[in-house]
Amino acid sequence: MATRTIFHSPLRPVEDEQIVGAGFAPDVSSDYTTQAEVRAYQRESVTKGDKMNSRGLRSQLKDSVPVAGLCPQGAYGLQDSLRSGFTSIKNELLPSHPLELSEKNFQLNQDKMNFSTLRNIQGLHAPLKLQMEYRAARQIQRLPFLPSSNLALDTLRGSDECIGFEDILCDPAQSEVMGEPHMMVEYKLGML
Amino acid sequence: MALSTILETPGAGFNFDNAERNAALEGLFEGGQTPKPLKTGTTIAGVVFKDGVVLGADTRATSSDVVADKMCAKIHYISPNIYCCGAGTAADTEKTTDLLSSNLSIFSLNSGRNPRMVMAVNILQDMLYRYHGQIGANLILGGVDCTGNHLYTVGPYGSVNKVPYLAMGSGDLAALGILEDGFKHDLELEKAKELVQAAIHAGIMSDLGSGNNIDICVITKEGVDYIRPYQESEYKDDRKMKYKYRPGTTAVLTEKVVPLNLEVVQETVQKMETV
C-alpha cells in the first residue's frame, strides 16, 4: 500500500469533503485497497481538518504550480516508457517548448495576480470571499472520466463571455482518445 | 477504444506533446533539419484621412518559392466599424482576427454598442503578449468609432503603435517611402485612395513576396466600402488553351448494366407538425 502524507493547514476552514467523495463511492475494489479503507481515509481527512478532499495526493500535486515543471510518472521517478512513450532526460528537467510552463500555469498566475491586486485595493475580505466561491464552484464536477461544463466556474470568472484558444483547440468533448474509466477513477483517488 | 495510458482528461487549448516528441527525436536523427513554419510575404498599408481610414493590401500568398494563392483576402472583418490587415503567418492572422471578431461581437450583443478601437487593440495586445511572439501576426487595425478615426499596429510580441499612416509586411519599406512622401493630414477620399494604391503598388513592384491585385477598404462613419479588387494586375496570365476535357475524350471499351432489385419491405408515414 502506498504511504500517504496529509498536510495540516490550520488557517483554512474545514470544508465539506464529502461533496466530491459522496458523489461516487468507488465500486471498483482493487486487490490492494478496499472500500472500508477508502472510507476510513475520507473520515481521517475530515477529522484532521485539512483542506484536501478525498482525492489522492498525486493527482492533486499535478494541479499545483510545479517548481521543476515536469516530473515523470511512475515509481521512483523513473521513466515509464510503456505508458508515456519516448522522452529524453532533458525533457524532464526543462520544458521542450518555451510556452509550455507559462501556458500550463496561465490561469493560476492570472488569478494570483488579480487576487493580490484586489487585496491591496479592497482588503483581505474581498479575495477571501471570491476564493470561497471559486472553490465551491470548482467542486461541481462529474465522475473523473466525464467532461464537465464548469458552468458556475465560467460564470464567476467571466469566461462565459469570452472566446479563447482553449475553446477552439483540443476540445475535450471531441477528443479522439478515451481513458479507461476504472483507471481514471483509481488515479483520482490515489490508488493507482 | 479506451486507452489505459490516459489518466486524466486532456486539457483544452494548445497541446505541447509534439514539441516533446520532436525534442526526443532530435537526438536520434542528428544533423537533420526540422521544417520551419513558412512566412508569407505581403504588403499592407493604412492611412487616416479626413472622414475615416483607408486600408490597402496586396493579394498574394506564397509558400516559400511558389505562389499559393493569387486572390487571398488579407483585409479581415473585425466588426462593422473596424477592419484589420494581417501580415505574417497566414494561419495565425486568420485565427487571431477571427477570435477578436467573435469576442467583439459577444460584447456588442451584450452592450448593444459598436466596439471601440481601443478595446480591439487591448484584446489583441493581451492575446499576443500571452504567447510571447510564437503567434506570428503583424496586424494593422483601422476603424472609426465615436471617438474618431484611428489606425493602430500590433506586433507579434504585443507592441502597439498609434499612427496616422503605416505599412507592414515584407514590402513595407517600399510602401513606406511612398507614404512618407505623399501623406498630409486631412486628405480627401480620392487622394487617400490613390496614395494607398501607389504605396501597395510600390510594394508589389519591389518585393517578391507581394503581387497580383490590390484590395482597398474605406471605413467611414457612414459605412464600409470594401473594394476587391481595386486594381487588377496587368500581368494576369492569359491561357491560350482550355485544360478541361470534353466528354468522349476517352473511349468506352465495355459496358455492363446490373439492375438492383429492391422491394419495399416496410413503409411508415410520420406527419410533420408544421405550425
Image (spheres, coloured by chain):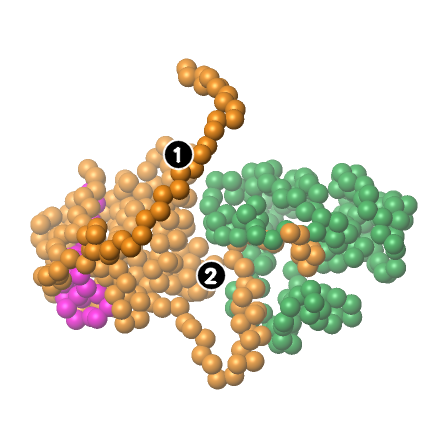
Chain colours: A green, B orange
Horizontal and vertical percent position of residue B274: 42, 17
Classed neighbour count for the residue bearing mark 2: other residues with Cα under 10 Å, few (<14), some (14–19), many (≥20): some
What residue is rendered at 79% in x and 38% in y?
Answer: A22
Residue B175 falls within the magenta-colored stretch: no
Task: Look at mark 2 in the image and give the residue it sits on.
Answer: B131
Residue B197 falls within the magenta-colored stretch: yes
Q: Note whether B28 is above or below A111 in the view shown.
A: below
Cα distance between the residues tagged 1 and 2: 28 Å
What residue is rendered at 40% in x and 48% in y?
Answer: B99
Horizontal and vertical percent position of residue B162: 29, 56
Residue numbers of the magenta segment = B196-220
Task: Look at mark 1 in the image and give the residue it sits on.
Answer: B109
Classed neighbour count for the residue bearing mark 1: other residues with Cα under 10 Å, few (<14), some (14–19), many (≥20): few
Horizontal and vertical percent position of residue B58: 20, 59
Q: Note whether B80 is above or below B1 in the view shown.
A: above
Q: Earlier in the sequence, mark 1 or mark 2?
A: 1
Chain ID, mark 1: B
Which element carries disc 2, helix, strand or loop?
loop
**Numbered badge on residue B32:** none
**B30 and B180: which one is in front?**
B30
